[in-house]
Image (cartoon, rainbow, N blue to C red):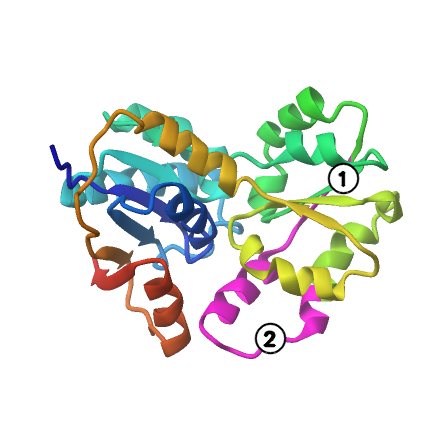
Amino acid sequence: MSDARPLLLFDSGVGGLSVLRAVRDLLPQAPIVYVADNGGFPYGTKSEAEISARVPALLGRRAERYRPRLITIACNTASTIALAHVRAALDLPVVGTVPAIKPAAESSRTRAIGVLGTEATVRQPYVDDLSARFAGDCLVLRHGSAGLVALAEAALRGEATSDAAFAAALSGLLDQPGGERIDTIVLACTHFPLVADRLARVAPRPLTFVDGAAGIARRIATLTRDQAWPETLTEGIAVFTAPVDVTPPLRASLAALGLTRIDLL
């Protein structure tokens, strides 16, 4: 039987579209509701208390409105701070986003990796734990960049962005002591894969960039493997929590992922 319940993906902005791309590859028939909390953007500069209070309440309201079969917090900052709170508040599966430290450590030849995320993500004990468990023999350096989040948002809106701004975000990691050894960088913010090509272009040497989108998509597919999907493709919905200027480039990016309806709630 057909089941029209959507997958709900959530982020502070458009970063979670990098996860949605991977989900579309594995589950092209899945109905999608993508929630961007632009009213609370950016998360990376907020306190843990603010995020842990805001995210469960917001997702609770959106779950009542859209009745999803599963929620994905496609945001590293929200996941590292509020995932347990959301799972406690909602009676449905909730998938979080984990910084891809394990695959980065597995692929690094120099045994030096970087973690590039928001300020809130890189300071979390969760990152300490992942580093200890999966990268104990590696030098792990971290850098939080709110500027890079804003650059990714601007790029999707079609605004001009400079190579120098991307280079500055990357140098915050590479210019640390030991940074010259880094060969692999964890993109520990879902915004950053959207601009990975720009980071690669300004990098002073070849670097490998790793993110968790494919792993998240596989987890969603596993959790829904015995469920039915609509027989025909349904209209995807992009939900914003505050007024937003949906520029033609942003609208095109949303439409390319099947998000052709825009709700403001």
Residue highlighted by disc 2: 161
Q: Quadrant of residue 121?
A: top right
For this view, does 204 lie left or right of residue 96? right
Q: Is residue 104 left or right of residue 152?
A: right
Q: Residue at x 59, y 34 (%)?
A: 124
Question: Hey, what amino acid is under mark 1?
Answer: Ile
Other residues around mark 2 within 10 Å, as few (<14) / some (14–19) / many (≥20): few
**Residue shown at the point (80%, 52%) measured from the top left:** 174
Residue 204 position (above or below residue 137)? below
Q: CA distance from mark 2 to mark 1?
A: 26 Å
223 falls in the magenta region: no
- For label 1, the SS is strand
User: Is 188 in front, or is 213?
Assistant: 213
16 displayed left or right of 259:
right
Q: Which label is found at residue 113?
A: 1
Instruction: Give coordinates of residue 36: x percent, y percent.
Output: 35, 55
Look at the image and give the residue range highlighted in magenta. 140-166
Q: Residue furthest left?
A: 1
